[in-house]
């Protein structure tokens, strides 16, 4: 494979920052789900019931995703700029187009922009 045929490479630190941004988006989405589910089952679930433990698992998942994002963000700060990887090819394994596109992008200026929430629910149709 010639250099003209080789896939574009991105600094690993930049790639880790993009992954961190996406994990933070998932954390915010999990917070909204956690709040909505909590309101729905709060009255029906006793602390001894199985649904109460499911809510605790959802909260734990949210904390885990946020923790992984912080971990990767810290690693990204220490990555030498000359360490590069082919993040475009890696994103071919991701089924969600919007997520794959976000992870593959070159600039990180609009990393805090979240997709329109209406697009998140297309499968439910209205």
Image: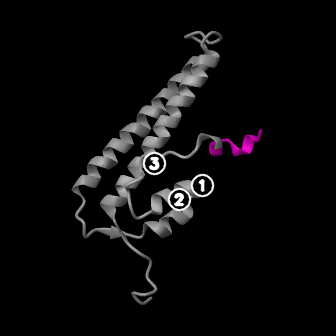
Place of residue 8 in the rendered image (x, y in percent of width and height, measured from the top left):
41, 75
Q: Residues within 10 Å of mark 1 (few under 14, many from 20)?
A: few
Q: Tell me the element at label 2.
A: helix
According to the picture, the residue beneath numbered tag 1 turns out to be 96
Q: Which mark is residue 100?
A: 2
Q: CA distance from mark 1 to mark 2?
A: 6 Å
Q: CA distance from mark 3 to mark 1?
A: 12 Å
State if disc 3 and disc 2 touch (CB < 8 Å): no
State if disc 2 and disc 1 touch (CB < 8 Å): yes
Task: Report the span colored magenta.
Answer: 119-126
Q: Quadrant of residue 54?
A: top right
Q: CA distance from mark 2 to mark 3?
A: 10 Å
Going by the image, does 61 lie left or right of 48? left
According to the picture, the residue beneath numbered tag 3 turns out to be 22
Q: Residues within 10 Å of mark 3 (few under 14, many from 20)?
A: many
The residue drawn where x is 44% and y is 45% is 23
Place of residue 111 in the rendered image (x, y in percent of width and height, measured from the top left):
41, 51
Overall secondary structure of the magenta section:
helix
Position of residue 94 relative to residue 46, above or below, is: below
The mark that comes first in sequence, 3 or 1, is: 3
Q: Tell me the element at label 3.
A: helix
Looking at the rendered image, the quarter that the C terminus falls into is: top right
The residue drawn where x is 45% and y is 48% is 22
């Amino acid at each position: 494979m010639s250099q003209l045929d080789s896939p574009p490479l991105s600094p690993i630190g930049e790639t880790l920052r993009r992954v961190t941004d996406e994990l933070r988006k998932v954390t915010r989405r999990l917070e909204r789900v956690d709040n909505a589910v909590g309101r729905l089952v709060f009255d029906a679930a006793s602390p001894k019931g199985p649904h109460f433990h499911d809510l605790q698992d959802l909260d734990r998942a949210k904390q885990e995703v946020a923790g992984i994002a912080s971990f990767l963000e810290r690693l990204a700060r220490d990555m030498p700029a000359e360490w590069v990887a082919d993040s475009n090819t890696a994103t071919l394994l991701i089924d969600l187009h919007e997520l794959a596109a976000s992870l593959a992008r070159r600039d990180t200026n609009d990393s805090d922009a979240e997709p329109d929430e209406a697009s998140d629910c297309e499968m439910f149709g209205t």
